[in-house]
Image (tube, helix red, strand yellow):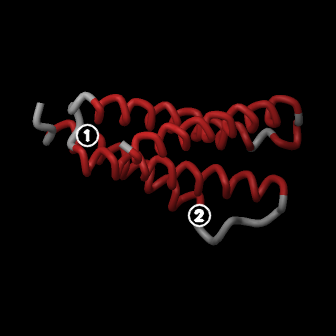
Amino acid sequence: MVAFRLLLGLAGLMGAAGVALAAASAHGTEASRLASASAMLLLHATAILACVALLARGLLHGGIGLTAAFGFVLGAALFAGDLTLRQYAGHSLFPFAAPTGGTLMIASWLSVTLAAVVAKR
């Protein structure tokens, strides 16, 4: 399925970005704020991989599970992107970008719960 391949590719990019931000955070005292952005990317890249695996096995409802997985991508991108821009450019992505991303990630986790409850298997 094309959506699965797209999600797997996005999870790989998120993981790589998370490791890069972790390295920047570890090696630069002025970049210590990037640790939370790194953690969000790494955690949610793993969540996307889990969603794809569970969707492929039919353990999550298809539409809700896919929505949750793409919500993880968008939410983590907003959160980490906003924190990274604040660190390096001195301004926000847009007002309330990080809280919007965090809210989207919470909603995605709740969607995973719903997708598991209504799954056919």
Residue that badge 2 annotates: 97
Q: Residues within 10 Å of mark 2 (few under 14, many from 20)?
A: some
Q: Are marks 1 and 2 in contact (CB under 8 Å)?
A: no
The amino acid at mark 2 is Ala
Q: Residue shown at 67%/36% (left/top)? A: 18
Secondary structure at badge 1 equals: helix
Residue closer to the observer: 91 or 81: 81
Q: Residue shown at 34%/52% (left/top)? A: 67
Residue that badge 1 annotates: 113
Q: Which mark is residue 61?
A: none
Counting from the top left corner in percent of width and height, residue 35 is at: 70, 37
Q: Residues within 10 Å of mark 1 (few under 14, many from 20)?
A: some
Q: Residue shown at 30%/46% (left/top)? A: 110
Count the labels in the image.
2
Is residue 40 rendered to the left or right of residue 17?
Answer: left
Which residue is at the far front? 1
Could you say which quadrant of the image residue 121 lies in? Answer: top left
Secondary structure at badge 2 equals: helix
Could you say which quadrant of the image residue 53 lies in? Answer: top left
Is residue 106 rendered to the left or right of residue 102?
Answer: left
Counting from the top left corner in percent of width and height, residue 55 is at: 29, 35
What is the C-alpha distance between the residues marked 1 and 2? 25 Å
| Sequence-first tag of 1 and 2 | 2
Q: Residue shown at 24%/45% (left/top)? A: 62
Q: Is residue 30 above or below residue 83?
A: above
Which residue is at the far left? 120
Could you say which quadrant of the image residue 54 lies in? Answer: top left
Counting from the top left corner in percent of width and height, residue 101 is at: 52, 56
Residue closer to the observer: 98 or 4: 4
The amino acid at mark 1 is Thr
Is residue 90 rendered to the left or right of residue 106?
Answer: right
Which residue is at the far bottom? 95
